[in-house]
Image (spheres, rainbow, N blue to C red):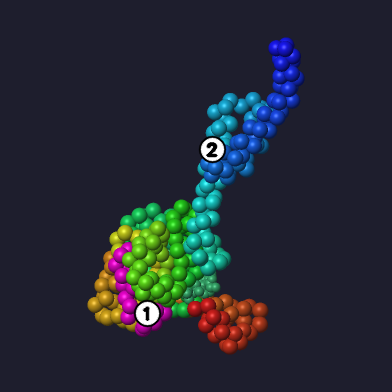
Amino acid sequence: MSTTTTVVSETRAKPSSETRAKHDAARVELLLSELRLPGVKLIWAKLAEQSDKEGWPAARFLAALAEHEMADRGRRRMERHLTEARLPAGKTLATFDFDSVPMVSKAQVMALASGDAWLGKGANILLFGPPGGGKSHLAAALGLALIENGWRVMFARTTDLVQRLQVARRELALESAIAKLDRYDLLILDDIAYVTKDQAETSVLFELIAARYERRSMLITANQPFGEWGKIFPDQAMTLASIDRLVHHATILEMNVESYRRREALDRKRGRGRPATHATIKKTEKSED
Ligand code: ADP
Ligand code: MG
């Protein structure tokens, strides 16, 4: 009887090494899902095959898997950060023509793009200049570079963000809405001067600036100099207090150049003799500013 049993189990043992390998593979897949290691899950079978073929020591196999997971996590984190940042598409430092803004130093902007010297201490950047001068482009391009360097950024038109914060205030949740924005090392507020009178009256912008002061950075673009900021805040005291906090630790870049679009249109006209009508120029400016 016992002999028979042994024979049976031996004849079973032959195909079972393959079966067991399949079984193990299925378990590995399940366990990796459970452990939330999707990067490892994608690559382990291929790496295991290579490892078996080339006779890697176990530690080498494990290190290769871990490295893969690290790189994959980094990629996914960056993708998340890019999505949450809501940057306008296609605005990069590489496509920004520094020659057309001679008062802005390319070296300085490149240094700011690493983020290290200013984001850690909650310093700010203020970009001033007339419409079309490249403020939004430069702001978005800096945001993108900072994300690539591992920082978290959010880009918003100022009036949109103010509107969101006003809704939060009505729901008695302004404080937590502002606290949630703490996750961003940098908040880009594009076109602060477009805040309307009724938006200013609720002072959410003042509270946002006060809350981030010396802790979390802001990059603000404005068509108008400080003298015109009176309508952004409910009263003069808040205007002064806000400006005071913003400029205390700030890099201010003045981009006093003629509209890039207008110059491009003029260049086209001169270069190729294909006149851009005034109507077209005006329309483009209006739609994008
Ligand atoms: P602003 O925000 O100051 O009104 P934008 O950044 O929206 O100006 O610029 C208007 C358009 O011109 C955008 O399409 C932008 O990409 C382009 N632009 C402006 N300045 C530059 C520049 N120096 N190099 C490349 N493109 C520029
Ligand atoms: Mg703009």
Q: At 59% across and 85% down in the image, what residue appears?
A: 280
Label 1, on which residue? 199
Asked whether mark 2 lies closer than 8 Å to ligand 1, one says no
Mark 2 is on which residue type? Answer: Ala
Q: Residue furthest front?
A: 1
Marks 1 and 2, Cα distance to the nearest angstrom?
Answer: 50 Å
Q: Is residue 97 above or below residue 282?
A: above
Q: Does residue 97 appear anywhere in the picture?
A: no
Q: At 44% across and 79% down in the image, what residue appears?
A: 130
Q: Tell me residue 41's x, y (percent).
A: 60, 41
Between residue 72 and residue 229, name the one nearer to us: 72
Q: Tell me residue 134's x, y (percent).
A: 48, 72
Res 244 → quadrant = bottom left
- Locate the N terminus by quadrant: top right
Marking on residue 66? 2
Q: Dot 1: few (<14), some (14–19), or many (≥20) neighbours within 10 Å?
A: many
**Magenta run includes residue 196:** yes
Magenta stretch bounds: 193-212
Q: Tell me residue 259's x, y (percent).
A: 50, 78
